[in-house]
Image (spheres, grey):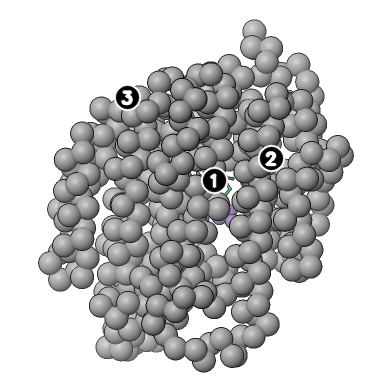
Amino acid sequence: SEHPTTGWDRPSMRRCWELLDLTSRSFSSVIKGLEGDLARVVCLFYLVLRALDTVEDDMTLPSHVKQPILRAFHQHTLTTGWNFTDSGPNEKDREVLVDYAVVVEEIRRLPAADRDAIVSIAQKMGVGMADFAERAESYAANQEKTEKRGAWAGEAKDDGKYLLTIASYELYCHYVAGLVGEGLSLLFAASGKESPLIAHQLELSNHMGLLLQKTNITRDVREDVEDGRFFWPREIWGNPKYGKFERMEQLCEATPKLAERPSAAFKEKAALAAANGVGQEQALYVLNAQILDALRHATPSLDYLRLLRNQSTFNFCAIPATMAMATLEICFNNPKVLGGNVKIRKADAAGLIMRSTNPREVSLIFREYARRIHARVTPRDPSFTGISVACGKIEQWC
Ligand code: PS7
Ligand code: MN
Ligand code: MN
Ligand code: MN
Ligand code: MN
Ligand code: MN
């Protein structure tokens, strides 16, 4: 029979487990694998953040609706009966918001330490998302004016449409993923299954979140650009050592959409782009620079994993991390990233789930992917030295 504390006896918690399966492609099984109560607590944390992210992602919501919801989401999370039914019909996870009252009901039942951790992370994340969304909004309002500003110059302030600096890219990733790592560490410590010290390893848990988020943002570039979302920082893609990109959209323009046959006109356009320094070869240099930037988080993530003592929390953290390394490896220098979405093969994913059970094995997996990237970088690539050094460091870490 089910462990009583996982809440199978309550209709509201049953619905929450269903919502987890409906909305999570990668986290549902690792969350269910957590020991005892931690599975239920992390499931609820996931649903709160999934709901918040659905509001953030909904480009059909006007700013005067989106802004206050993001900023007060932590309060809604404690308000009995609260829900939100106005998400755009295309939001894939809108059900979590429509049924949010069951999440609220279960959050209110949690021990205070768990509830406070979840609510305070939701507050910080919601405010961070709102701040970034506000920039995009002010861009749309002043579109002409902003587009006339110079290209890559390392300006201190983001212009709204694009993230300008690596620092602002990291701040955005901190809000949407570093804070998840921080919250999970708080919940691990509160459960007593991990040392209380893990809750204070904010730098390491942030690195772990950034490894995952930067991998996701790098892999999803085509889909995100087509949706009008520009997460790669101009400090990387606008750097003249890779090409002559003035708009982030140009990174995908010289590559046909995956599974579509390029027309003669398209090929002509792509050749012209190459001649102008904004072709596929240059876009791949930018992609590889994005991957190099993500790889900086690999060794600190291994350090974080080494602090874990519980088998179920270890698996929960290690599986997404090895998946991220596998994703960086298939994305490296791969034109398919610019044309659409690449995914790890099912069998490879299954192998990683089996193997990601102890720090030594995980270090070996990281080393293997680092070696493969290392072996594929060419001296022509402006990131050649950087990639070699970064991969060498990962290969030496265990
Ligand atoms: C609470 C497990 C383990 C110390 C909803 C796990 C979207 C990459 O492209 O949904 O939108 O489909 O595939 C997860 C650190 C966060 C960071 C972030 C909460 C690791 C809201 C996950 C997941 C910290 C913002 C999934 C960062 O991407 O993206 C729980 C340690 C949610 C973790 C988002 C992204 C997660 C993400 P897409 P996905
Ligand atoms: Mn996803
Ligand atoms: Mn989002
Ligand atoms: Mn999203
Ligand atoms: Mn994504
Ligand atoms: Mn998405």
Position of residue 271 relative to residue 26, above or below, is: below
Give whichever of discs 2 and 3 has the lower sequence position. 2
Q: Position of residue 333 (x, y in %)?
A: 27, 62
Disc sitting over residue 179 in the figure:
1
Disc sitting over residue 1 in the figure:
none
Q: Which amino acid, by three-letter code, is at mark 1?
A: Leu
Question: Mark 2, residues whose alpha carbon is within 10 Å: few (<14), some, or many (≥20)?
Answer: many
Helix, strand or loop for disc 1: helix
Give whichever of discs 3 and 1 has the lower sequence position. 1
Give whichever of discs 2 and 1 has the lower sequence position. 2
Helix, strand or loop for disc 2: helix
Position of residue 235 relative to residue 330, above or below, is: below
Q: Is residue 363 visible?
A: yes
Say which quadrant the N terminus sits in: top right
Q: How many marks?
A: 3
Q: Position of residue 315 (x, y in %)?
A: 42, 27
> On the rendering, which quadrant does ligand 3 occupy?
bottom right
Labels 2 and 3 touching (C-beta < 8 A): no
Seen as rendered, the residue at the extreme top is 1
Seen as rendered, the residue at the extreme right is 81
In the foreground, 325 or 93: 325
Q: Please identify the quarter of the rendering in which residue 237 is found.
A: bottom left
Which-is-in-front pick, marks 2 and 3? Answer: 2
Helix, strand or loop for disc 3: loop
Q: Which residue is mark 3?
A: 358
**Left or right relative to 225: residue 323:** left
Question: Mark 3, residues whose alpha carbon is within 10 Å: few (<14), some, or many (≥20)?
Answer: some
Q: Which residue is mark 2?
A: 119
